Amino acid sequence: MRHLLSMVAILMWVGTAEAAEQQTCTRDEAMQAEDEAVALRDWTAVYRSFKRYAHCDDGAISEGYSDSIARLLTREWKRVGDLERLTASDKSFEQFILHHIDETDLPEELKRISENARMRCPPKATRLCRLIAARVRELFSR
């Protein structure tokens, strides 16, 4: 089951990445995305940034997104319902979030994210919490 979830996540991310690659990231967009990615304070801001700059998601920009997402999943878990609502209506955003739970996150952050997903999941976010917990397990099994 875990491998199936991983394969689905990879295939969905590849589709998102291919669509993003069709749009060129300008120098100005890359600079704006890099500044913004690391400073995102809530899920609505992450979603807006994703919609604007997903085609720029590489290198330092990608690391900035991963930092912001890890911070929100560890320190702002009480707002995971907002994330659930956004991902329920946009599966490419869901895959973006899962992709950015990654090796750049500290092991302590990953453990906290997993604990939140397993032990503090709101009833409406069960599916998303399972995907988040599976993503963390995948990273620890490498």
Image (tube, helix red, strand yellow):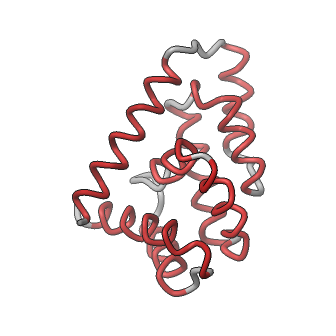
Position above or below: 119 against 111: below
Please name the residue shown 63% across and 50% down the image.
Answer: 89
Q: Is residue 61 left or right of residue 51?
A: left
- Residue 137 at x, y percent in the picture: 32, 69
Residue at image location 70% in from the left, 70% down from the top:
76
Residue 133 image position (x, y, % from top left): 42, 71
Quarter-of-image position of residue 134: bottom left
User: Considering depth in this image, is 80 or 65 the residue closer to the camera?
Assistant: 80
Q: Give the image quarter of residue 32.
A: top right
Q: How many marks?
A: 0
Where is residue 68? Give x, y as percent. Answer: 64, 53
Location of the N terminus (image quadrant): bottom left
Question: Where does the image place residue 142, in percent across and percent down from the top left?
Answer: 22, 59
Taking 130 as reference, is 94 above or below it? Answer: above
Q: Residue at x 54, y 79 (%)?
A: 116
Question: In this rendering, is residue 106 above or below 94?
Answer: below
On screen, residue 77 versus residue 142, left or right, reads right
Q: Residue at x 49, y 69 (%)?
A: 127
